[in-house]
Amino acid sequence: MIEYQEVSKSYDKGHTYAVLNISFDVREGETLVLLGSSGCGKTTLLKLTNRLIEPTSGSIELNGEDISQLDPILLRRRIGYVFQGIGLFPHMSIEENTTIIPRLLGWPYDKRKQSFNDLMNLVGLDPISYADRYPKELSGGQQQRIGVARALAADPEYLLMDEPFGALDALTRDTLQQELLSLKERLQKTIIFVTHDIFEALTLADRIAILHKGNLEQIGTKDDILGNPRTDFVRNLFEKPARQLAAYKDLL
Ligand SMILES: Nc1ncnc2c1ncn2[C@@H]1O[C@H](COP(=O)(O)OP(=O)(O)OP(=O)(O)O)[C@@H](O)[C@H]1O
Ligand SMILES: [Mg+2]
């Protein structure tokens, strides 16, 4: 479980806050979607979670342990991170990209190879035909699958995914969303998934946390949020897609 307690982050010595006084928890095994528009603090919250940045105030606990007391390197081994944008290293082959963390951990060659094969199968790519290719030789969707494989390489307890499918066309995004749902069934990881896409949030989330200008507007299940939006912002957020769907209803 991850617990955020009154977490704030200012990048400019307190003039403005990228996240402000946020408290919520992420339960074991759930997929929590952080939903909000550009600049609302989603990436900041993920980076705070694995200590790529430190909070201005407040604390974050992982299974009851304050992360500021944990070694950041050990912490990051427990948390897989799929970065915003593709984030593969262009000069490294697919196998090298996928096995960065196992190499840092000093796993022997056979164990790394086995892990690579397993991960590739998990994300639906043939290990033999992709191992020696470079990121630019893959499609966007294939690169995203490698990003997910890389994040899972050290078998982390938690998975942070920062708009992993944001740059993909709608059909590919739909395929990867369905794959993620089936992966989640098999792996039983606790996932924080960032998106600005309401339909993606509704597809993937066990619970949704809605951020707006650094504030947590509401957190709850889809039914909670759709049935009982707590602020005008949340109500407006879901009204537009509902109107769009209604407009197409006769065609579908
Ligand atoms: N390293 C930084 N230095 C200064 N300001 C930053 C830094 N990183 C982010 N910010 C600011 O903090 C706010 C939140 O940024 P963040 O990247 O968390 O947003 P986001 O919700 O992930 O947006 P997007 O959907 O565009 O990725 C923004 O106003 C941004 O300009
Ligand atoms: Mg971001």
Image: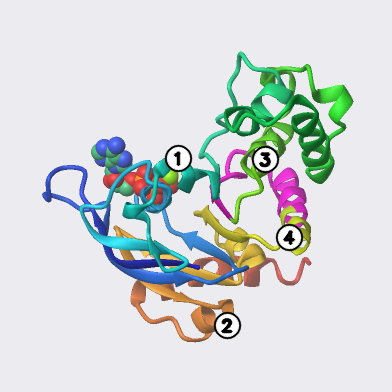
Secondary structure under tag 4 reads helix
Q: Nearer the viewer, residue 180 or 250?
A: 180
Q: Is mark 4 within 8 Å of ligand 2?
A: no
Q: Nearer the viewer, mark 1 or mark 2?
A: 1
Could you tell me residue 215's position as x and y percent?
30, 64
| Neighbourhood count class around disc 4 (C-alpha, 10 Å): few under 14, some 14–19, many 20 upward | some
Quadrant location of the C terminus? Answer: bottom right
Q: Nearer the viewer, mark 2 or mark 4?
A: 4
The earlier-in-sequence mark between 2 and 4 is 4
The residue labelled by disc 2 is: 223
Where 21 sits versus 167, above or below?
A: below
Q: Is residue 46 visible?
A: yes
User: Which amino acid does the dot numbered 4 rest on?
Assistant: Leu
Q: Nearer the viewer, mark 3 or mark 2?
A: 3
The residue labelled by disc 1 is: 73
Could you tell me residue 1's position as x and y percent?
50, 68
Check if residue 167 falls in the magenta segment: yes
| Neighbourhood count class around disc 3 (C-alpha, 10 Å): few under 14, some 14–19, many 20 upward | many
Q: Which residues are magenta?
A: 158-179
The residue labelled by disc 4 is: 181
The residue at 55%/30% (across/down) is 87
User: Which amino acid does the dot numbered 2 rest on?
Assistant: Asp
Could you tell me residue 250's position as x and y percent?
75, 71
The residue at 71%/39% (across/down) is 145
Q: Nearer the viewer, mark 1 or mark 3?
A: 1
| In this rendering, position of residue 82 left or right of residue 17 | right
Could you tell me residue 237's position as x and y percent?
45, 67
Distance from disc 1 to disc 4, alpha carbons, whole Å, reads: 29 Å
| In this rendering, position of residue 197 left or right of residue 52 | right
